[in-house]
Image (cartoon, helix red, strand yellow):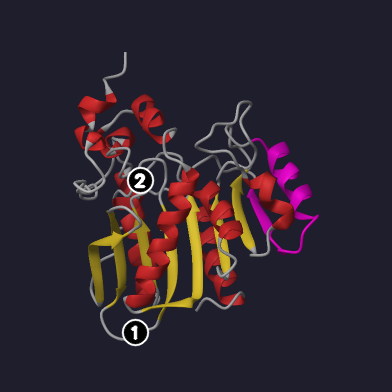
Amino acid sequence: MLEDLNSLFPETKTSRRGFMATSLCTGFALAVQPINAQDLITTDTNGLIAGEVKIPTKDVEIPAYRAMPDKGKGFPTVLVVQEIFGVHEHIKDVCRRFAKLGYIAIAPEMYFRQGDVSKLQMNQIFSVVQKVPDAQVLSDLDAVVAWAGKNKGNTKKLGITGFCWGGRIVWLYAAHNPKVKAGVAWYGRLVPPQQRTAEQPTHPTDIAAKLTVPVLGLYAGKDGGIPLPTIDQMKAELAKGKSKSEFVIYPEAAHGFHADYRPGYKKDDAQDGWKRLLAWFKKNGIA
């Protein structure tokens, strides 16, 4: 039986005026332990400014991890949208990888109002995540873009990438904000569930035909949660529009193949995907 969420997250009862956002996860989320240490990529902070920042939104300040070069300004801006596990060490490291290449990369904690999932088991995480409204996520990402523009980011060169839960958000945000130059979605769900919810009413196949931002989808051929026919369905919807979005399918990969801290990590495919991401951003003016 799940623990009562109000006892786990008493701050969710606090009024908006009195809410104080929690700090980001240190290390890796409990649900992904033990870590696959042999393939773990650790990017240092030499030559970078990296760490937690607070970003004002319409109602509260949200925590985010930000990494950028320690010299200069006007950096191309990349929004990094978390996996279902929140902004833990892997997502922070991805931000540092971007920063080493001259970007400002920002990963906001998208569940902060609903709770800290980093200390929960998987079944408990789902109970939190299903309560996170897409409208809240998109609005918070707008706030991150505004913050970046005031903090050395060049938001005329704006990109977004996301993994798993964040992969779906990449498609939705690209439709929400046409000022995004390009997106890269890593294995995010594409089609609606059997029963839609008020919190997540819209899904990538719903917006594909009207999409104008080019999105590169990096997906796995052996992903049990995202069957290949759903990718074909998304391709058919995209073909009705003019976004010039594309897919790359890695036939032998499974879900989460980019996550170097997990057993399903597939090094060759992850590295190829990263190279394709950088080339996609460069091709579309984010460099």
Residue 180: horizontal and vertical position, in percent?
55, 68
Q: Magenta residues?
A: 227-250
Near-viewer residue (226 or 41): 226
Viewed as shown, does residue 188 lie left or right of 49? right
Residue 24: horizontal and vertical position, in percent?
24, 50
Near-viewer residue (282 or 43): 282
Q: Which residue is mark 2?
A: 261
Mark 1: amino acid:
Lys
Mark 2 touching mark 1, by CB under 8 A?
A: no
Q: Nearer the viewer, mark 2 or mark 1?
A: 1
Q: Which residue is mark 1?
A: 73
Local SS, label 2? loop
- Specify whether residue 41 is in view: no
Residue occupying image coordinates x 72% and y 64%? 244
The stretch drawn in magenta includes residue 247: yes
Residue 40: horizontal and vertical position, in percent?
33, 51
How many neighbours does mark 2 have within 10 angstroms: few (below 14), some (14-19), or many (20 or more)? many
